[in-house]
Image (cartoon, helix red, strand yellow):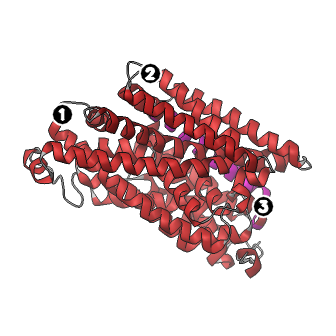
């Protein structure tokens, strides 16, 4: 058995030990399973949002992009960090203060039932697609770095067993405590891998001297356009405010101030990882110029010392695990809270509801694995899918800051318009007048929201101060 495989196996075993420990807390009720009993401290909030952000796209995906466009690919993680900052300053405390559980619940509280229905459809779709990506990435990591042990399908199934198992056992407590280990491992693996790679290639100066001409490899934009980088920031700030993963973490905080501080510290953790992975991607351009871009980071890693490569391999997979667990729990929460309990069985007992939550995680986990096996271009559509959160973010911000413009039908029609706009973007290339669909989404959603405000006279009830901030 190789050293790399031993390290990965030990990491898996540690995750399951943590999950069994977390099960004691998670089994006390649905609030403990879904929201860690609303007892997450600042550190746990920080590592949870960092674990959610630093996934396959933020490591292997960034290195792949850097292999083609330069160090500027690291702005992807910087965009995630910016989203965490905005969430911390603007929304995290509000969610915790309102004692809500999901954005659809918030929509029905201030708008109407159809607003809740359409929003839960959109948010579950987003969660499932992104979770499927994590299985694909997990399979790619294991099969690329340990081909003698894992095929692509075998790596995906192994990833699914770990993702689903950890989430099923301990819920947010399991995910939260596991993320402590995962984030530490990510930092150790990526930092050590970066430093050794730089030493092997003679430093940044030597790498820069050997790079092909024509691209500003270490420039602020490299081979990217300003509109592309700006689009990343708009997408990440938009989705961080209303995607179920960040919302669930904010709702699990001990209080409002903890939620705010946790997201701000999470941003600090998220920011540097992308540029380190991008640097390894640029280094791969020099060391292995003929490889496929997707193999930039795996190729660099497997040529390190076996112990270092094993730790870095586990770190990359840890990034995938930390993201997938939170996403899967978020999808389960949306189903159990906004579909099962709200429409099918509102009088469900606490014990049965906890069982429903676990079954939802299991069923959705298997569904997303099936989606991953049948996926086409999920990676390419990831940022497009996240653009769908535009309507949810616009409605949330309007509800909190300009409720006078909100009407009972605002949530439904703004969300519907956002869905239609994204569908049109996919089907009709002629409408792609912007560099990214997020710009079209904001234009369409804002226009729809303001139009409803003008033609509809049925205002929402203005949120009272104690519904926005309880201070508890």
In percent of width and height, residue 408 lies at 75, 67
| Residue 15 showing in the rendered view | yes
Above or below, 2 relative to 189: above
User: Which residue is rendered at x = 63% and y = 78% of the image?
Assistant: 402
| Residue 450 showing in the rendered view | no
Q: Residues within 10 Å of mark 1 (few under 14, many from 20)?
A: some
Point out the tag, 3 or 1, that comes first from the N-terminus: 3
Point out the tag, 2 or 3, that comes first from the N-terminus: 3
Residue holding disc 2? 150
In percent of width and height, residue 203 lies at 14, 51
Above or below, 287 relative to 399: above
Q: CA distance from mark 1 to mark 2?
A: 23 Å
Q: Residues within 10 Å of mark 3 (few under 14, many from 20)?
A: many
Start and end of the magenta stretch? 110-137
Q: Residues within 10 Å of mark 2 (few under 14, many from 20)?
A: some
The C terminus lies in quadrant? bottom right
Q: CA distance from mark 2 to mark 3?
A: 49 Å
Residue holding disc 3? 112
In percent of width and height, residue 71 lies at 24, 53
Badge 2 element: loop
Residue holding disc 1? 288
Point out the tag, 1 or 2, that comes first from the N-terminus: 2
Q: Check contact, mark 1 vs mark 2: CB within 8 A.
A: no
């Amino acid at each position: 058995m190789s050293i790399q495989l031993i390290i990965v196996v030990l990491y898996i075993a540690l995750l399951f030990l943590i999950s069994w420990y977390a099960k004691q807390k998670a089994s006390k009720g649905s609030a403990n399973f879904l929201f860690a009993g609303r007892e997450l401290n600042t550190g746990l909030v920080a590592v949870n949002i960092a674990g959610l952000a630093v996934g396959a796209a933020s490591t292997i995906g960034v290195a792949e992009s850097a292999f083609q466009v330069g160090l500027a690919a690291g702005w992807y993680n910087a965009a995630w960090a910016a989203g965490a900052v905005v969430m911390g300053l603007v929304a995290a405390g509000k969610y915790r203060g309102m004692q809500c559980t999901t954005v659809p619940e918030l929509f029905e509280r201030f708008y109407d039932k159809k607003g809740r229905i359409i929003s839960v459809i959109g948010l579950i779709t987003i969660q499932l697609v992104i979770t499927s990506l994590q299985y694909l990435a997990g399979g790619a990591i294991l099969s690329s770095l340990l081909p003698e042990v894992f095929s692509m399908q075998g790596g995906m199934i192994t990833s699914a067993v770990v993702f689903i198992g950890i989430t099923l056992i301990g819920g947010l407590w399991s995910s939260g405590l596991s993320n402590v280990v995962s984030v530490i491992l990510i930092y150790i693996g990526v930092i050590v891998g970066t430093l050794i790679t730089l030493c092997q290639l003679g430093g940044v100066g030597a790498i820069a001297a050997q790079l092909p001409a024509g691209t500003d490899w270490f420039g602020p934009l490299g081979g990217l356009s300003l509109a592309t980088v700006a689009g990343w920031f708009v997408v990440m700030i938009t989705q961080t405010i209303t995607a179920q993963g960040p919302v669930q973490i904010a709702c699990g905080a001990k209080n409002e101030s903890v939620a705010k501080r946790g997201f701000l510290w999470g941003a600090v953790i998220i920011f540097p990882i992308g540029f380190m992975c991008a640097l390894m991607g640029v280094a791969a351009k020099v060391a292995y110029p003929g490889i496929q871009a997707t193999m930039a980071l795996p190729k660099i890693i497997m040529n390190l010392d076996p112990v270092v490569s094993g730790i870095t391999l586990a770190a990359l997979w840890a990034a995938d695990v930390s993201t997938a667990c939170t996403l899967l729990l978020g999808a389960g929460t949306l189903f159990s809270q906004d579909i099962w309990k709200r429409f099918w069985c509102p009088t469900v007992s606490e014990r049965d509801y906890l069982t429903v939550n676990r079954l939802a995680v299991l069923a959705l986990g298997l569904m997303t694995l099936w989606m991953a096996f049948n996926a086409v271009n999920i990676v390419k559509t990831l940022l497009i899918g996240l653009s769908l959160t535009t309507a949810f973010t616009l409605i949330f911000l309007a509800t909190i800051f300009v409720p006078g413009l909100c009407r009972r039908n605002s949530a439904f029609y703004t969300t519907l318009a956002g869905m239609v706009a994204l569908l049109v973007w996919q089907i009709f290339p002629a409408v792609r007048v912007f560099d990214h669909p997020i710009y079209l989404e904001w234009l369409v959603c804002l226009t729809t929201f303001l139009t409803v405000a003008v033609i509809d006279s049925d205002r929402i009830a203005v949120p009272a101060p104690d519904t926005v901030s309880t201070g508890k």
